[in-house]
């Protein structure tokens, strides 16, 4: 079973630029099971839908190292 490490609101609501009709965007950092990590079920990134994104912790760290702005912003807010 996956373990959720961090879950946050992102997009316009994170930056305070949302309007009354804005949707809610969510990002999640998770740690996958050892079986998934070592097998064929491993996914480092998945978009459940356009408003819900998930990153496996390894992918998240790779993005942090590469100075991906949006990932740094998620850590700050």
Image (spheres, rainbow, N blue to C red):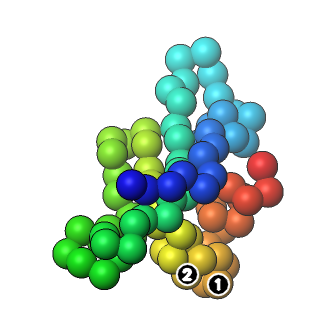
| Distance from Cα at disc 1 to Cα at disc 2 | 5 Å
Q: Which residue is mark 2?
A: 62
Which is nearer the eye, 33 or 22?
A: 33
> Where in the figure is residue 56, as x and y percent of width and height?
46, 66
Which is nearer the eye, 61 or 21?
A: 61
User: Is 1 situated left or right of 9 in this image?
Assistant: left
Packing grade of label 2 (10 A; few <14, some 14-19, many >=20) is: few
Task: Say which residue appears at 43% left-offset and 39% top-offset.
Answer: 51
Q: Is residue 63 visible?
A: no
Which is nearer the eye, 57 or 64?
A: 57
Q: Which residue is mark 1?
A: 65
Where residue 75 sits, quadrant-wise, is bottom right
User: In the drawing, what numbered circle is on residue 40?
Assistant: none
Tell me the quarter of the image containing the N terminus: bottom left
Where residue 73 sits, quadrant-wise, is bottom right
> Where in the figure is residue 5, as x and y percent of width and height?
60, 56
User: Is 70 situated left or right of 30 in this image?
Assistant: right
Q: Assess whether mark 2 and mark 1 are in contact (beta carbons under 8 angstroms).
A: yes
Q: Is residue 9 visible?
A: yes
Task: Say which residue appears at 55% left-offset and 81% top-offset.
Answer: 62
Task: Say which residue appears at 64% left-offset and 76% top-offset.
Answer: 64
């Amino acid at each position: 079973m996956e373990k959720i490490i961090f879950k946050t609101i992102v997009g316009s609501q994170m930056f305070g630029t949302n309007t009354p009709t804005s949707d809610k965007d969510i990002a999640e950092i998770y740690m996958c099971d050892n079986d998934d990590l070592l097998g064929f079920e491993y996914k480092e990134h998945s978009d459940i839908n356009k408003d819900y994104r998930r990153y496996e912790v390894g992918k998240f760290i790779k993005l942090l190292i590469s100075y991906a702005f949006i990932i740094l912003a998620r850590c700050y807010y």
